[in-house]
Image (cartoon, grey):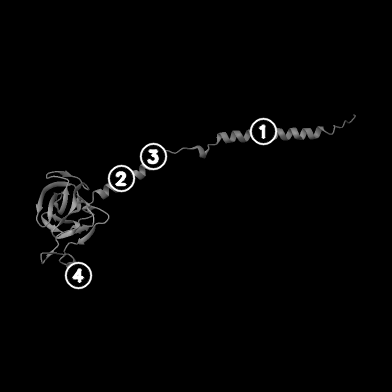
Amino acid sequence: MKKRKLKGFVLPSIYIITIIVLAIGITFFANNLMEKEPSNTNIEYDSSVFNQTEESEEINVNNEVDNQISKPYIGTDVTISKDYYKEDDTPENQEKALIYYENTYMKNTGILYASENVFDVIAVTDGTVKEIKNDEILGTVLTLEGKNGLTCIYYTLGEVLVKEKDEVKQNDILAKSGQSQIETTKQTLLFETYLDGALTDPNNIFGKKIEELD
């Protein structure tokens, strides 16, 4: 049998064709594989699912804080001028809790707040405005009757924004601070609290829920 030799360009051509076919096959296989696999970059998440939990927690925290008895004012520069007079306190603190008026020292039966500027006076809890009256020494006086035996009395008020028998909610603005004979140089608020008719230290009720008072 007579042997025949392939021409020189035939083998290189076969190699090139084979490589092209393999390349096309690999590309086609890879494209199919990518179409079958889900792409994480295109997944969209419903952010409301995550925000709902965060908002629920925030609402619960705010409601819990709102149920607690608050301080009786809104203002960044309000300070305590005279604290509540405690019978078992140190002599130094007792002296600071005395109010001086017309050559007489009196035990402070509430907390006297003071500021250089007018500030808002608010309801520390839900309640009813029981009485509004004027006093020659202490200025305008407002009595707020709350629940669970709590009664709050606001002295030295300026402009009053509510009237008797009004139902108010915690943090509602009742009045503006004012001046009185016991403190004529600053805006003030004298705040007293009573539980079942007995005078009590306001510091002992702040931050508590109305149901926790005893």
Q: Residue under circle 3?
A: 48
In the rendered image, residue 122, in percent from the top left (x then y), is placed at 20, 50
In the rendered image, residue 133, in percent from the top left (x then y), is placed at 10, 50
Q: CA distance from mark 4 to mark 1?
A: 94 Å
- Say the numbered circle drawn on residue 92: 4
Horizontal side of 105 relative to 208 (left or right) equals left
Mark 4: amino acid: Glu
Q: Would you say the residues marked 3 and 1 are in contact, meaning their CB atoms lie under 8 Å apart?
A: no
Q: Residue 137, located in which quarter of the rendered image? A: bottom left
- Say the numbered circle drawn on residue 25: 1
Mark 1: amino acid: Gly
Mark 3: amino acid: Ser
In the rendered image, residue 29, in percent from the top left (x then y), is placed at 63, 34
Q: Quadrant of the N terminus?
A: top right
Most distant residue in the top direction: 1
Q: Earlier in the sequence, mark 3 or mark 1?
A: 1
Q: CA distance from mark 3 to mark 4?
A: 57 Å
Depth check, mark 1 against mark 2: the one in front is 2
Horizontal side of 209 relative to 134 (left or right) equals right
